[in-house]
């Protein structure tokens, strides 16, 4: 089965971009849609968006103007960039794989806590 | 109003059953959606439990015990997660989710306490 590991800066200043990378191992990337999901401390899960290997993306409408998700199949990487962050973007960010043909968020990374603070 | 509404908390005794609801906003017909359920314990990522559309179209997550089952209440426009034989390890946060127009959405989550 696929394994996922998020990495990136744990502290970001307000108004700056948040960038995270997900390293994929254990299976071919073409078999999955690659999602980002976050959970702010004390709150519930929020779906951010996904990318497929073709580069096709779908984003949460509430975040669409600020986010970009991309994939690099040659390096087995999925990337998230969230612009103009505020304290409200402080959250655990999860990289999540959904098998093509499925609708289940089956494969989760351990998550990366990103804090927005000056 | 949120698309998916869940009670914020629920308590039940070990060995008992618990029914967690996920109510869809008016305009979203529960009979047409796959309802997905996830469980998250502190310090761990969420884990997929099951998908339920109907008794003939459902899927149990890998490793998810058969004590977890799904159903729907069409009159309430809600999806239901039933947990039987509650155990201490069932504590945590439970989330429902659907896909709508190729976008994912989650309910606010229910915190289940087993005591």
Image (spheres, rainbow, N blue to C red):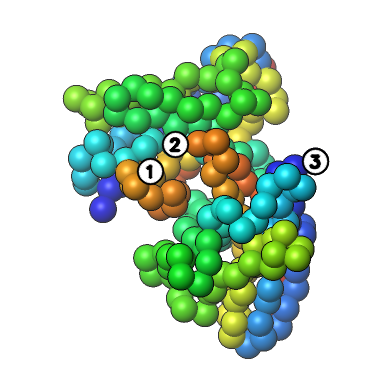
Query: What residue is at 59 percent from the left and 82 percent from the top?
Result: B84
Residue A1 in the image: x percent, y percent? Answer: 26, 53
Q: Are marks 3 and 2 on the same chain?
A: no
Name the residue nearer the viewer: A2 or A113.
Answer: A2
Q: Quadrant of the C terminus of chain A?
A: top right
* Residue placed under numbered mark 1 in the picture: A97
Q: Mark 2 and mark 1 in contact? Answer it, CB < 8 Å.
A: yes
Instruction: Depth check: give the residue in front, A118 or B57.
Output: B57
Label 3 to label 2: alpha-carbon separation: 25 Å
Q: Residues within 10 Å of mark 1 (few under 14, many from 20)?
A: many
Q: CA distance from mark 1 to mark 3?
A: 29 Å
Q: Secondary structure at mark 1?
A: strand
Say what secondary structure mark 2 lies in. strand
Q: Are marks 1 and 3 in contact (CB under 8 Å)?
A: no
The residue under label 3 is B1
Disc nearest the viewer among 1 and 3: 3
Q: Is residue A29 left or right of residue B6?
A: left
Circle 2 marks a residue in which chain?
A
In the rendered view, does A70 fall on the left or right side of B66?
left
- Circle 2 sits on which residue? A35
């Amino acid at each position: 089965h696929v394994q996922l590991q998020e990495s990136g800066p744990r502290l970001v200043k307000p108004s700056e971009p948040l960038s995270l990378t997900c390293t994929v191992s254990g299976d071919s990337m073409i078999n999955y849609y690659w999602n980002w999901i976050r959970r702010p401390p004390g709150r519930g899960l929020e779906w951010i968006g996904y990318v497929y290997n073709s580069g096709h993306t779908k984003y949460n409408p509430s975040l669409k103007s600020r986010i970009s998700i991309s994939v690099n199949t040659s390096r087995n990487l999925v990337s998230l960039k969230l612009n103009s962050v505020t304290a409200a973007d402080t959250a655990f960010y999860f990289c999540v794989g959904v098998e093509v043909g499925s609708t289940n968020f089956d494969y989760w990374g351990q998550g990366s806590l990103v804090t927005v603070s000056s | 109003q949120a698309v998916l509404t869940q009670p914020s908390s629920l308590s039940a005794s070990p060995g008992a059953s618990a029914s967690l609801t996920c109510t869809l906003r008016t305009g979203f017909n529960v009979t047409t959606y796959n309802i997905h359920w996830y469980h998250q314990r502190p310090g761990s990522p969420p884990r997929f439990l099951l998908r339920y559309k109907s008794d003939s179209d459902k899927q149990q997550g890998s490793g998810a015990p058969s004590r977890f089952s799904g159903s729907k209440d069409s009159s309430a426009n809600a999806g239901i997660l039933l947990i039987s034989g509650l155990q201490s390890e069932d504590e945590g946060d439970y989330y429902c989710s659907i896909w709508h127009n190729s976008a994912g959405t989650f309910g606010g989550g229910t915190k289940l306490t087993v005591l």
